[in-house]
Amino acid sequence: MYRFNHEAFQKIIQHVSDGVQVVNLWGQLIFCNRQSAILDDINIEESLGRHITELYPSLDDTNSTILRVLETGEPILNLDQKYTTYLGNEIHTVNSTIPLFDERGKLMAVAEISRNITEVKKLSEQVVDLQKVVLGATDHFVADKPLFNFEDIITRDPATLETLSKAMKAAQNDASILITGDTGTGKELLVQAIHNSSPRRDHPFIPQNCAALPESLLEGILFGTLKGGFTGSTNRPGIFEIAGGGTLFLDEINSMPIALQTKILRVIQDGRFRRIGDTRTREANVRIVAAINKDPQEAIEAGELRRDLYYRLNTITLNLNPLRERQGDVALLSGYFIKKFNAKYYRNVQGISPEALKVLEDFSWPGNVRELEHVIEGIMSLTEAARIELSDLPRQLVNAPWRQKHCHQLNLRAHVEELEKSLIKEAMRLAAGNISKAAQMLDIPRQTLQYKLRKLNADN
Ligand SMILES: Nc1ncnc2c1ncn2[C@@H]1O[C@H](COP(=O)(O)OP(=O)(O)OP(=O)(O)O)[C@@H](O)[C@H]1O
Ligand SMILES: [Mg+2]
Protein backbone atom coordinates (compact mmCIF):
# COMPACT_ATOMS: atom_id res chain seq x y z
CA MET A 1 0.00 0.00 0.00
CA TYR A 2 1.15 3.52 -0.77
CA ARG A 3 2.14 5.33 2.40
CA PHE A 4 2.21 9.04 2.80
CA ASN A 5 5.57 10.20 3.97
CA HIS A 6 7.20 13.47 4.77
CA GLU A 7 8.25 13.97 1.17
CA ALA A 8 4.77 13.37 -0.18
CA PHE A 9 3.34 15.94 2.19
CA GLN A 10 5.97 18.47 1.23
CA LYS A 11 5.11 17.95 -2.40
CA ILE A 12 1.43 18.49 -1.75
CA ILE A 13 2.08 21.59 0.30
CA GLN A 14 4.24 22.99 -2.51
CA HIS A 15 1.15 22.99 -4.70
CA VAL A 16 -1.51 24.41 -2.41
CA SER A 17 -2.56 27.96 -3.22
CA ASP A 18 -2.03 29.33 0.29
CA GLY A 19 1.38 30.35 1.55
CA VAL A 20 2.84 27.98 4.16
CA GLN A 21 5.90 28.71 6.31
CA VAL A 22 7.35 26.77 9.22
CA VAL A 23 9.66 28.34 11.78
CA ASN A 24 11.68 26.48 14.44
CA LEU A 25 12.02 27.30 18.14
CA TRP A 26 14.81 29.74 17.38
CA GLY A 27 12.65 31.71 14.98
CA GLN A 28 14.47 30.43 11.90
CA LEU A 29 12.60 29.64 8.71
CA ILE A 30 12.81 25.88 8.11
CA PHE A 31 10.15 25.43 5.45
CA CYS A 32 8.51 27.70 2.93
CA ASN A 33 6.32 26.66 0.02
CA ARG A 34 6.37 28.27 -3.42
CA GLN A 35 3.20 30.26 -2.89
CA SER A 36 4.61 31.80 0.25
CA ALA A 37 7.82 32.76 -1.52
CA ILE A 38 5.81 34.39 -4.32
CA LEU A 39 3.57 36.19 -1.87
CA ASP A 40 6.43 37.65 0.11
CA ASP A 41 8.85 38.20 -2.77
CA ILE A 42 11.48 36.01 -1.15
CA ASN A 43 13.86 33.41 -2.51
CA ILE A 44 13.42 30.07 -0.79
CA GLU A 45 17.05 28.84 -0.86
CA GLU A 46 18.41 32.16 0.40
CA SER A 47 15.79 32.43 3.12
CA LEU A 48 15.94 29.03 4.79
CA GLY A 49 17.78 29.16 8.10
CA ARG A 50 17.38 32.93 8.47
CA HIS A 51 15.58 34.49 11.41
CA ILE A 52 12.16 35.82 10.40
CA THR A 53 12.84 39.32 11.68
CA GLU A 54 15.77 39.36 9.29
CA LEU A 55 13.50 38.32 6.41
CA TYR A 56 10.74 40.75 7.35
CA PRO A 57 12.36 43.87 8.73
CA SER A 58 9.00 45.31 9.73
CA LEU A 59 8.41 42.47 12.17
CA ASP A 60 9.49 42.25 15.80
CA ASP A 61 8.22 40.40 18.87
CA THR A 62 5.39 42.89 19.36
CA ASN A 63 3.72 42.36 15.99
CA SER A 64 4.89 39.00 14.67
CA THR A 65 2.23 36.33 15.09
CA ILE A 66 4.85 33.61 14.61
CA LEU A 67 6.95 34.92 17.48
CA ARG A 68 3.86 35.28 19.63
CA VAL A 69 2.79 31.68 19.02
CA LEU A 70 6.36 30.48 19.71
CA GLU A 71 6.04 32.15 23.08
CA THR A 72 2.49 31.18 24.04
CA GLY A 73 2.00 27.85 22.25
CA GLU A 74 -1.57 29.01 21.47
CA PRO A 75 -2.85 29.18 17.89
CA ILE A 76 -3.97 32.46 16.34
CA LEU A 77 -6.64 31.87 13.72
CA ASN A 78 -7.89 33.90 10.76
CA LEU A 79 -6.09 37.09 11.56
CA ASP A 80 -6.16 39.90 9.03
CA GLN A 81 -2.72 41.23 8.13
CA LYS A 82 -1.63 43.99 5.83
CA TYR A 83 2.01 44.54 5.00
CA THR A 84 4.41 45.68 2.35
CA THR A 85 6.91 43.22 0.92
CA TYR A 86 10.48 44.32 0.50
CA LEU A 87 9.73 44.90 -3.18
CA GLY A 88 7.06 47.36 -2.13
CA ASN A 89 3.99 45.30 -2.94
CA GLU A 90 1.02 45.88 -0.69
CA ILE A 91 -0.35 42.57 0.47
CA HIS A 92 -3.47 41.80 2.44
CA THR A 93 -3.66 38.31 3.91
CA VAL A 94 -5.69 36.27 6.34
CA ASN A 95 -3.33 34.18 8.47
CA SER A 96 -3.59 31.24 10.77
CA THR A 97 -0.58 30.55 12.94
CA ILE A 98 -0.49 27.19 14.62
CA PRO A 99 1.90 25.57 17.10
CA LEU A 100 3.31 22.13 16.21
CA PHE A 101 3.99 19.75 19.09
CA ASP A 102 5.83 16.43 19.32
CA GLU A 103 4.23 13.26 20.75
CA ARG A 104 5.03 14.34 24.30
CA GLY A 105 3.36 17.68 23.82
CA LYS A 106 6.58 19.71 23.58
CA LEU A 107 6.41 22.70 21.23
CA MET A 108 8.68 22.01 18.24
CA ALA A 109 7.84 24.60 15.62
CA VAL A 110 5.20 27.04 14.39
CA ALA A 111 3.47 27.00 11.02
CA GLU A 112 1.83 29.97 9.40
CA ILE A 113 -0.71 29.57 6.62
CA SER A 114 -1.49 32.73 4.67
CA ARG A 115 -4.30 33.33 2.23
CA ASN A 116 -3.72 36.24 -0.09
CA ILE A 117 -6.93 38.24 -0.28
CA THR A 118 -5.49 41.30 -2.03
CA GLU A 119 -7.28 40.42 -5.25
CA VAL A 120 -10.47 39.32 -3.53
CA LYS A 121 -10.55 42.66 -1.80
CA LYS A 122 -10.17 44.55 -5.07
CA LEU A 123 -12.87 42.44 -6.71
CA SER A 124 -15.30 42.83 -3.86
CA GLU A 125 -14.83 46.59 -3.95
CA GLN A 126 -15.45 46.56 -7.68
CA VAL A 127 -18.68 44.67 -7.08
CA VAL A 128 -19.85 47.31 -4.64
CA ASP A 129 -18.87 50.06 -7.08
CA LEU A 130 -20.79 48.34 -9.86
CA GLN A 131 -23.82 47.87 -7.67
CA LYS A 132 -23.70 51.56 -7.00
CA VAL A 133 -23.53 52.37 -10.70
CA VAL A 134 -26.30 49.97 -11.62
CA LEU A 135 -28.56 50.91 -8.74
CA GLY A 136 -27.79 54.60 -8.90
CA ALA A 137 -28.41 54.81 -12.63
CA THR A 138 -32.16 54.63 -12.42
CA ASP A 139 -34.82 55.60 -9.96
CA HIS A 140 -36.55 52.29 -10.19
CA PHE A 141 -33.64 49.91 -9.85
CA VAL A 142 -34.99 47.67 -12.55
CA ALA A 143 -31.66 45.94 -13.05
CA ASP A 144 -31.63 44.50 -9.58
CA LYS A 145 -35.32 43.84 -9.22
CA PRO A 146 -35.79 40.72 -7.13
CA LEU A 147 -37.29 37.94 -9.12
CA PHE A 148 -39.73 36.34 -6.73
CA ASN A 149 -43.11 37.38 -5.41
CA PHE A 150 -45.35 35.65 -2.92
CA GLU A 151 -47.34 34.10 -5.81
CA ASP A 152 -44.15 32.35 -6.95
CA ILE A 153 -43.73 30.51 -3.67
CA ILE A 154 -45.46 27.20 -4.25
CA THR A 155 -46.84 25.34 -1.25
CA ARG A 156 -49.99 23.82 0.16
CA ASP A 157 -48.45 22.79 3.45
CA PRO A 158 -50.40 24.39 6.31
CA ALA A 159 -47.32 25.34 8.36
CA THR A 160 -45.62 26.93 5.36
CA LEU A 161 -48.81 28.77 4.37
CA GLU A 162 -48.93 30.10 7.91
CA THR A 163 -45.32 31.34 7.57
CA LEU A 164 -46.21 33.03 4.29
CA SER A 165 -49.16 34.87 5.75
CA LYS A 166 -47.01 36.02 8.66
CA ALA A 167 -44.41 37.19 6.12
CA MET A 168 -46.99 39.14 4.12
CA LYS A 169 -47.98 41.03 7.23
CA ALA A 170 -44.34 41.59 8.19
CA ALA A 171 -43.67 43.02 4.73
CA GLN A 172 -45.84 46.01 5.60
CA ASN A 173 -43.74 47.19 8.52
CA ASP A 174 -40.06 47.89 9.08
CA ALA A 175 -39.02 45.57 11.90
CA SER A 176 -35.99 43.35 11.40
CA ILE A 177 -36.72 39.77 10.45
CA LEU A 178 -34.94 36.50 11.06
CA ILE A 179 -35.56 33.64 8.66
CA THR A 180 -34.66 30.13 9.74
CA GLY A 181 -34.67 26.99 7.63
CA ASP A 182 -32.41 24.29 6.24
CA THR A 183 -30.58 24.70 2.97
CA GLY A 184 -32.84 24.89 -0.08
CA THR A 185 -36.07 25.53 1.83
CA GLY A 186 -36.61 28.87 0.08
CA LYS A 187 -35.20 31.44 2.49
CA GLU A 188 -33.89 33.75 -0.21
CA LEU A 189 -37.15 33.39 -2.14
CA LEU A 190 -39.08 34.51 0.89
CA VAL A 191 -36.89 37.57 1.49
CA GLN A 192 -37.29 38.64 -2.12
CA ALA A 193 -41.05 38.26 -1.87
CA ILE A 194 -41.09 40.31 1.33
CA HIS A 195 -39.08 43.09 -0.27
CA ASN A 196 -41.20 43.05 -3.41
CA SER A 197 -44.45 43.46 -1.57
CA SER A 198 -43.14 45.98 0.96
CA PRO A 199 -43.29 49.78 0.71
CA ARG A 200 -39.56 49.57 -0.03
CA ARG A 201 -40.09 47.69 -3.30
CA ASP A 202 -38.92 50.57 -5.50
CA HIS A 203 -35.62 50.78 -3.67
CA PRO A 204 -32.69 48.38 -3.84
CA PHE A 205 -32.71 44.83 -2.57
CA ILE A 206 -29.18 43.82 -1.69
CA PRO A 207 -28.28 40.32 -0.55
CA GLN A 208 -24.95 39.87 1.18
CA ASN A 209 -23.61 36.48 2.15
CA CYS A 210 -21.79 36.89 5.45
CA ALA A 211 -19.77 33.68 5.11
CA ALA A 212 -17.93 34.60 1.94
CA LEU A 213 -15.54 37.28 3.16
CA PRO A 214 -13.06 37.88 5.97
CA GLU A 215 -13.96 40.38 8.64
CA SER A 216 -12.22 43.52 7.48
CA LEU A 217 -13.53 43.17 3.93
CA LEU A 218 -17.06 42.49 5.02
CA GLU A 219 -16.95 45.47 7.33
CA GLY A 220 -15.81 47.75 4.49
CA ILE A 221 -18.48 46.38 2.20
CA LEU A 222 -21.25 46.85 4.73
CA PHE A 223 -20.34 50.25 6.11
CA GLY A 224 -18.05 51.75 3.48
CA THR A 225 -14.60 53.26 3.90
CA LEU A 226 -13.07 56.68 4.13
CA LYS A 227 -9.90 57.51 2.27
CA GLY A 228 -6.86 56.57 4.33
CA GLY A 229 -8.96 55.09 7.10
CA PHE A 230 -7.92 51.66 5.97
CA THR A 231 -4.65 50.96 4.19
CA GLY A 232 -5.09 51.69 0.53
CA SER A 233 -8.76 52.49 0.96
CA THR A 234 -10.65 55.11 -0.95
CA ASN A 235 -13.88 56.93 -0.28
CA ARG A 236 -16.57 54.43 -0.95
CA PRO A 237 -20.04 53.84 0.36
CA GLY A 238 -20.98 50.49 1.84
CA ILE A 239 -24.16 48.63 1.13
CA PHE A 240 -25.89 50.27 4.08
CA GLU A 241 -25.73 53.44 1.99
CA ILE A 242 -26.28 51.84 -1.38
CA ALA A 243 -29.33 49.93 -0.17
CA GLY A 244 -30.75 53.20 1.21
CA GLY A 245 -34.54 53.03 1.36
CA GLY A 246 -34.45 49.34 0.50
CA THR A 247 -33.83 45.95 2.06
CA LEU A 248 -30.53 44.44 3.12
CA PHE A 249 -30.49 40.65 3.26
CA LEU A 250 -27.75 39.32 5.53
CA ASP A 251 -27.51 35.66 4.60
CA GLU A 252 -25.78 33.16 6.93
CA ILE A 253 -25.66 35.74 9.69
CA ASN A 254 -24.10 33.18 12.05
CA SER A 255 -20.97 33.15 9.87
CA MET A 256 -20.49 36.87 10.39
CA PRO A 257 -17.56 37.54 12.76
CA ILE A 258 -18.83 38.32 16.26
CA ALA A 259 -17.26 41.79 16.35
CA LEU A 260 -19.21 42.74 13.24
CA GLN A 261 -22.40 41.32 14.68
CA THR A 262 -21.96 43.87 17.49
CA LYS A 263 -21.79 46.63 14.90
CA ILE A 264 -24.89 45.39 13.11
CA LEU A 265 -26.71 45.33 16.43
CA ARG A 266 -25.71 48.92 17.00
CA VAL A 267 -27.06 49.99 13.60
CA ILE A 268 -30.35 48.27 14.33
CA GLN A 269 -30.56 49.97 17.71
CA ASP A 270 -29.45 53.51 16.83
CA GLY A 271 -30.27 53.58 13.14
CA ARG A 272 -26.83 55.07 12.57
CA PHE A 273 -23.45 53.86 11.37
CA ARG A 274 -20.00 55.07 10.38
CA ARG A 275 -17.81 54.37 7.39
CA ILE A 276 -14.51 52.76 8.44
CA GLY A 277 -12.11 55.52 9.39
CA ASP A 278 -14.83 58.17 9.49
CA THR A 279 -15.84 60.17 12.55
CA ARG A 280 -19.12 61.27 11.05
CA THR A 281 -22.16 59.08 11.65
CA ARG A 282 -24.72 58.50 8.95
CA GLU A 283 -28.37 57.65 9.02
CA ALA A 284 -29.21 54.08 8.04
CA ASN A 285 -32.43 53.61 6.15
CA VAL A 286 -32.55 49.92 5.40
CA ARG A 287 -34.69 47.10 6.52
CA ILE A 288 -32.57 44.21 7.73
CA VAL A 289 -33.58 40.65 7.03
CA ALA A 290 -31.17 37.98 8.26
CA ALA A 291 -31.15 34.27 7.53
CA ILE A 292 -29.64 31.32 9.31
CA ASN A 293 -29.64 27.71 8.17
CA LYS A 294 -29.41 26.09 11.58
CA ASP A 295 -31.21 26.33 14.90
CA PRO A 296 -30.43 29.82 16.27
CA GLN A 297 -30.15 28.49 19.83
CA GLU A 298 -27.54 26.01 18.66
CA ALA A 299 -25.70 28.82 16.89
CA ILE A 300 -25.79 30.92 20.07
CA GLU A 301 -24.51 28.05 22.17
CA ALA A 302 -21.71 27.41 19.65
CA GLY A 303 -20.68 31.07 19.98
CA GLU A 304 -21.54 31.83 16.36
CA LEU A 305 -24.44 34.17 16.98
CA ARG A 306 -24.64 36.94 19.53
CA ARG A 307 -27.56 36.40 21.83
CA ASP A 308 -28.46 40.10 21.96
CA LEU A 309 -28.42 40.35 18.16
CA TYR A 310 -30.65 37.30 18.03
CA TYR A 311 -33.15 38.94 20.38
CA ARG A 312 -33.15 42.04 18.22
CA LEU A 313 -33.75 40.12 15.00
CA ASN A 314 -36.15 37.77 16.63
CA THR A 315 -39.09 40.21 16.83
CA ILE A 316 -40.27 38.48 13.68
CA THR A 317 -39.01 34.95 13.09
CA LEU A 318 -40.14 33.09 10.01
CA ASN A 319 -39.37 29.40 9.93
CA LEU A 320 -39.37 27.33 6.76
CA ASN A 321 -39.85 23.60 7.34
CA PRO A 322 -37.83 20.94 5.55
CA LEU A 323 -39.56 19.59 2.44
CA ARG A 324 -39.98 16.10 3.95
CA GLU A 325 -42.22 17.59 6.65
CA ARG A 326 -44.44 19.56 4.27
CA GLN A 327 -47.74 17.96 3.46
CA GLY A 328 -48.54 17.61 -0.22
CA ASP A 329 -45.69 19.80 -1.38
CA VAL A 330 -43.61 17.13 -3.13
CA ALA A 331 -46.50 16.41 -5.53
CA LEU A 332 -47.42 20.05 -5.97
CA LEU A 333 -43.83 21.21 -6.55
CA SER A 334 -43.06 18.30 -8.88
CA GLY A 335 -45.98 19.37 -11.07
CA TYR A 336 -44.83 22.97 -10.92
CA PHE A 337 -41.26 22.13 -11.91
CA ILE A 338 -42.44 19.82 -14.71
CA LYS A 339 -44.32 22.78 -16.22
CA LYS A 340 -41.33 25.03 -15.74
CA PHE A 341 -38.93 22.63 -17.50
CA ASN A 342 -41.43 21.71 -20.24
CA ALA A 343 -41.05 25.32 -21.29
CA LYS A 344 -37.28 25.38 -20.89
CA TYR A 345 -36.51 22.09 -22.67
CA TYR A 346 -39.42 22.14 -25.17
CA ARG A 347 -40.88 18.98 -23.65
CA ASN A 348 -44.44 17.92 -23.22
CA VAL A 349 -44.31 15.84 -20.07
CA GLN A 350 -47.82 15.44 -18.73
CA GLY A 351 -47.06 14.33 -15.19
CA ILE A 352 -45.59 11.65 -13.07
CA SER A 353 -46.62 8.03 -12.47
CA PRO A 354 -48.06 7.15 -9.04
CA GLU A 355 -45.13 4.76 -8.31
CA ALA A 356 -42.55 7.38 -9.17
CA LEU A 357 -44.36 10.00 -7.12
CA LYS A 358 -44.45 7.62 -4.17
CA VAL A 359 -40.63 7.34 -4.30
CA LEU A 360 -40.31 11.13 -4.38
CA GLU A 361 -42.72 11.47 -1.48
CA ASP A 362 -40.88 8.91 0.62
CA PHE A 363 -37.52 10.51 0.00
CA SER A 364 -35.93 12.57 2.79
CA TRP A 365 -34.74 15.49 0.55
CA PRO A 366 -31.75 16.73 2.54
CA GLY A 367 -31.33 19.49 -0.07
CA ASN A 368 -35.05 20.32 0.14
CA VAL A 369 -36.84 22.18 -2.67
CA ARG A 370 -33.60 23.02 -4.46
CA GLU A 371 -32.73 19.31 -4.63
CA LEU A 372 -36.20 18.36 -5.90
CA GLU A 373 -35.93 21.04 -8.58
CA HIS A 374 -32.54 19.70 -9.71
CA VAL A 375 -33.80 16.13 -9.79
CA ILE A 376 -36.81 17.09 -11.94
CA GLU A 377 -34.64 19.20 -14.21
CA GLY A 378 -32.18 16.32 -14.60
CA ILE A 379 -34.95 13.94 -15.61
CA MET A 380 -36.59 16.43 -17.96
CA SER A 381 -33.37 17.22 -19.76
CA LEU A 382 -33.07 13.53 -20.67
CA THR A 383 -36.50 12.00 -21.01
CA GLU A 384 -38.53 11.82 -24.21
CA ALA A 385 -41.43 10.16 -22.41
CA ALA A 386 -44.86 11.69 -21.92
CA ARG A 387 -44.82 10.86 -18.23
CA ILE A 388 -42.09 10.50 -15.63
CA GLU A 389 -41.85 6.81 -14.72
CA LEU A 390 -40.08 4.96 -11.94
CA SER A 391 -37.32 4.03 -14.38
CA ASP A 392 -36.63 7.73 -15.09
CA LEU A 393 -35.72 8.48 -11.49
CA PRO A 394 -32.04 8.80 -10.66
CA ARG A 395 -30.61 5.77 -8.95
CA GLN A 396 -29.68 7.56 -5.74
CA LEU A 397 -33.40 8.09 -5.10
CA VAL A 398 -34.55 4.56 -5.73
CA ASN A 399 -31.59 2.69 -4.26
CA ALA A 400 -30.92 4.62 -1.12
CA PRO A 401 -33.15 3.20 1.59
CA TRP A 402 -31.22 5.16 4.23
CA ARG A 403 -32.28 8.37 2.58
CA GLN A 404 -35.96 7.48 2.71
CA LYS A 405 -38.17 9.53 4.93
CA HIS A 406 -39.06 6.63 7.24
CA CYS A 407 -35.37 5.77 7.58
CA HIS A 408 -34.80 9.33 8.50
CA GLN A 409 -35.98 7.98 11.85
CA LEU A 410 -32.64 6.21 12.14
CA ASN A 411 -31.11 9.62 12.02
CA LEU A 412 -29.74 10.47 15.46
CA ARG A 413 -30.76 14.07 15.23
CA ALA A 414 -34.36 13.26 14.37
CA HIS A 415 -34.51 10.87 17.32
CA VAL A 416 -33.03 13.36 19.71
CA GLU A 417 -35.51 15.97 18.47
CA GLU A 418 -38.39 13.58 19.14
CA LEU A 419 -37.09 12.80 22.61
CA GLU A 420 -36.64 16.51 23.29
CA LYS A 421 -40.22 17.22 22.20
CA SER A 422 -41.67 14.62 24.51
CA LEU A 423 -39.53 15.75 27.47
CA ILE A 424 -40.61 19.35 26.92
CA LYS A 425 -44.26 18.39 26.73
CA GLU A 426 -43.92 16.32 29.90
CA ALA A 427 -42.16 19.14 31.77
CA MET A 428 -44.80 21.65 30.67
CA ARG A 429 -47.50 19.29 31.87
CA LEU A 430 -45.84 18.77 35.27
CA ALA A 431 -45.22 22.50 35.63
CA ALA A 432 -48.84 23.19 34.71
CA GLY A 433 -47.73 25.41 31.85
CA ASN A 434 -45.32 27.53 33.90
CA ILE A 435 -42.35 28.06 31.56
CA SER A 436 -39.85 29.05 34.28
CA LYS A 437 -40.64 25.96 36.31
CA ALA A 438 -40.51 23.69 33.29
CA ALA A 439 -37.17 25.20 32.29
CA GLN A 440 -35.83 24.47 35.79
CA MET A 441 -36.94 20.85 35.55
CA LEU A 442 -35.30 20.51 32.17
CA ASP A 443 -32.21 22.33 33.42
CA ILE A 444 -32.08 24.75 30.49
CA PRO A 445 -32.39 28.56 30.35
CA ARG A 446 -35.93 29.88 30.22
CA GLN A 447 -35.26 31.66 26.91
CA THR A 448 -34.09 28.41 25.34
CA LEU A 449 -37.28 26.71 26.40
CA GLN A 450 -39.33 29.62 25.10
CA TYR A 451 -37.67 29.36 21.73
CA LYS A 452 -38.15 25.61 21.61
CA LEU A 453 -41.82 25.97 22.54
CA ARG A 454 -42.38 28.53 19.83
CA LYS A 455 -40.74 26.19 17.34
CA LEU A 456 -42.85 23.28 18.58
CA ASN A 457 -46.00 25.32 18.10
CA ALA A 458 -44.93 26.40 14.64
CA ASP A 459 -44.25 22.79 13.67
CA ASN A 460 -47.60 21.52 14.89
N1 LIG B 1 -41.77 27.08 -2.37
C1 LIG B 1 -41.03 27.15 -3.49
N2 LIG B 1 -41.63 27.28 -4.68
C2 LIG B 1 -40.93 27.31 -5.81
N3 LIG B 1 -39.60 27.22 -5.86
C3 LIG B 1 -38.93 27.08 -4.72
C4 LIG B 1 -39.61 27.04 -3.46
N4 LIG B 1 -38.69 26.92 -2.49
C5 LIG B 1 -37.50 26.87 -3.09
N5 LIG B 1 -37.62 26.96 -4.43
C6 LIG B 1 -36.54 26.86 -5.43
O1 LIG B 1 -35.40 26.40 -4.74
C7 LIG B 1 -34.30 27.28 -4.92
C8 LIG B 1 -33.58 27.42 -3.60
O2 LIG B 1 -34.27 28.30 -2.76
P1 LIG B 1 -33.47 29.40 -1.92
O3 LIG B 1 -32.28 29.86 -2.64
O4 LIG B 1 -34.45 30.42 -1.49
O5 LIG B 1 -33.03 28.49 -0.69
P2 LIG B 1 -32.28 28.89 0.65
O6 LIG B 1 -33.17 28.50 1.78
O7 LIG B 1 -31.84 30.30 0.57
O8 LIG B 1 -31.06 27.87 0.64
P3 LIG B 1 -29.53 28.05 1.19
O9 LIG B 1 -29.61 27.98 2.68
O10 LIG B 1 -28.84 26.86 0.62
O11 LIG B 1 -29.05 29.35 0.67
C9 LIG B 1 -34.90 28.58 -5.43
O12 LIG B 1 -34.07 29.21 -6.33
C10 LIG B 1 -36.17 28.15 -6.10
O13 LIG B 1 -35.89 27.85 -7.45
MG1 LIG C 1 -29.90 31.13 0.44
Image (cartoon, rainbow, N blue to C red):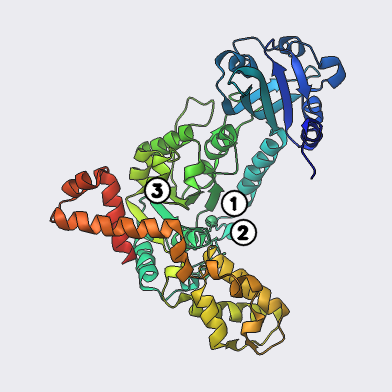
Residue 427, position as x, y percentages in the image: 20, 54
> What type is the residue that disc 2 sits on?
Ala
Point out the residue furthest to the front here.
Answer: 1
Q: Does residue 333 appear in the picture of this structure? A: no
Label 2: which secondary element: helix
- Quadrant of residue 11 within the rendered picture: top right
Residue 144, position as x, y percentages in the image: 59, 57
- In three-dimensional space, the C-alpha distance between marks 1 and 2, rounded to whole angstroms, equals 7 Å
Residue 236 higher or lower than 251, as above or below:
above
Q: Which label sits on residue 143?
A: 2
Q: How many other residues sit within 10 Å of disc 3, few (<14), some (14-19) or many (≥20)? A: many
The residue carrying mark 3 is 296
Point out the residue furthest to the left here.
Answer: 432
The residue carrying mark 1 is 135
Considering only order in the chain, which callout, 3 or 1, is on the residue closer to the N terminus?
1
Q: Is mark 2 within 8 Å of ligand 1?
A: no
Considering only order in the chain, which callout, 2 or 3, is on the residue closer to the N terminus?
2
Tell me whether the residue at label 1 lies in contact with that at label 2, contact meaning CB atoms closer than 8 angstroms. Answer: yes
Q: Nearer the viewer, residue 12 or 178?
A: 12
> What type is the residue that disc 1 sits on?
Leu
Q: Nearer the viewer, residue 399 or 54?
A: 399
